[in-house]
Amino acid sequence: MKMDILKNVGAGLKPAPTNLPDSPGVYLMKDADGEILYIGKASSLKDRVRSYFQKASRGVKFNAPTLKTTAMLEQIADIEWIVAGSDLEALILENNLIKKHKPKYNVILRDDKNYPYLKLSTDEDFPRFSIVRRYKKDKALYFGPYVPANALRETLIVINKIFPLRKCKKAITGRDERPCLNYQIGRCLAPCCGKISKDDYYKIVKDARLFLEGKDKELLKSLNEKMERESEALNFEEAAKTRDRIKKIERVLEKQRITVTEMIDQDVIGMAREGGNANIQILFIRNGMMTGRKDFFWDDLKDTSNNEVITSFVEQFYRDEIQIPDEVLIPIELEDRGIEGWLSQRKEKQVHIIIPKRGHKASLIKLSEENALIRLNEALTEKKKYELILNELKDMISLQQLPRRIEAFDISNISGSQAVGSMVVWEGEWPKKSDYRRFKIKTVHGADDYGMMKEVLHRYYSKLAGALHAASLPDLVMIDGGRGQLNTALDVFKELGIDIKVIGIAKARGDDERERIFLPNKDEPIELEPSSPVTLLLQRIRDESHRFAISYHRKLMNKRMFVSVLDDIKGIGPIRKRKLLKTFESAESAVKAVIRHS
């Protein structure tokens, strides 16, 4: 790849660029401060970048079809470009750069979640199911994604009833003294105690796999044949178990199966728009079963075409580790048909992007679009309610603007042991988990909550001090604590030269458990009305920061206890200790394994 920079091409500056190569590549438009405004790709950098400009009698006039493009072009000072070896290479590079820089004028997919999958660990002697949040290209089998996550948990409950594979993570030797409770209630085959052979266990694994792959006829035929063999052998107890399993499978299939003409994996994309607001809903269909759906909302797309929104969504949604289907159904043409080749390369198998006009696939698009519109209207209603809550909070604590971004801090420790701090972020109506931070206390020893809060705030906000990062500051900082913690935060911000609104929140003492807000320069706190919308919002944010801090604290405490137990056993070095930590769920299990193999 080759990078070049073209200086001063903004409004009133130099004329349209003439020295760009007629090659595929990526261009980065920047303002006078060097901030990237927009990242795009092109089969011909020369033609694409010059298309933003057109000659006029007076110097350069921008060819700007929308207000958004006009506003962007007025700010451009520099254009950088990177020559790529092919259109596909340009697409991949553009995607990576957008993910890294998140330019102001690109359509950004704001989704900070990894999608839940059901993983079957076929690389183990006795495979098991587990819920994972990341799809990997390893030896395991992945089914999904399942959205929302509770859909996967419900699916796993059903699978555990029908296919009683093991649930534990421990190493299976077949020499355990007694099985766990799951065996007693018929939810495990107890390979740990040698209750089932490896071959028989794999037959159950095969059945579970057929079920999840949608091979219903093959699975039911196999189970019916098994039931007949058991009956002929007068093994009526096992035949009854197989019969019950068949009935359970048939009931589940009746509920989950949708009408399909092809047993393939499909993602169905539908979109609804209302002014600058948009919602894209994607339906996940795997082997004829709808495993879930997911909505993606934007509120800043007034001057963005439908083609650009759909194209940007497809590029960014499939950019990360996600299971790519055989078909992607979309309502309109993409701006770049090369995306189909890119998806095929990522999947290592042909992927088809289809714009259905009639038939069953078109009805799936319509279903997705209708649901997208319903969810968009619901979201807009909730947004209006949330705006009212923010306005009430703004007036209550005398803010100059709505607190659209709130950062909340909490400390968790037991007498100073394994002390940690947490920061959670609220944007819009929801937590923004990609911006969460956790801190292991380094400089404070003993039970000094004020000192710990000071360390956490100083470590985080010292990186944002100065005019360069002023735009990154939140509208409101919320501290879990009363007057003392609030004063600690004020001292830190004064030291760093940061002008930021901060409040403390704590329950009243004694029998009165109402929440109170502590404000700078006000002696008396504001007492919140129980169950008021503002109270519920602040409680939700505070409880989330508390949960996040406690979960990290417990993780460190458990790890410390685990390591300390292993330290007391002679002959366990650092390498073996790491393996034990990775393999076993508890210190007790690890110690038993060490003793058994000694």
Image (tube, helix red, strand yellow):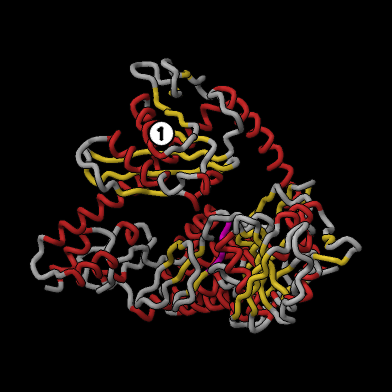
Q: Residue furthest left?
A: 570
Residue pointed to by mark 1: 494
Measured from the top left, where is residue 153 in percent x and y? Answer: 49, 56
Confirm whether residue 240 shows in the render: no
Q: Is residue 176 left or right of residue 332?
A: left
Measured from the top left, where is residue 274 in percent x and y? Answer: 79, 47
What's the amino acid at mark 1? Lys
Is 433 in front, or is 376? 433
Residue at 33% from the left image edge and 61% from the top image edge: 183
Q: Quadrant of residue 335?
A: bottom right
Residue at 22% from the left image edge and 36% from the top image edge: 447
Establish if 189 lies above or below 386.
below
Q: Quadrant of residue 522?
A: top left
Membership of 184 in magenta stretch: no
Figure disc tally: 1
Is 408 in front, or is 586? 408
Measured from the top left, where is residue 243 in percent x and y? Answer: 51, 67
Task: State the extent of the magenta-drawn residues as a range.
Answer: 143-147
Q: Is residue 197 left or right of residue 314?
A: left
The C terminus lies in quadrant: bottom left
Q: Please tell me whether mark 1 sits on a helix, a strand or a loop.
A: helix
Residue at 35% from the left image edge and 31% from the top image edge: 488
Establish if 376 lies above or below 399.
below
Establish if 360 lies above or below 546.
below
Magenta residues: mostly which secondary structure? loop
Is 240 in front, or is 123? 123
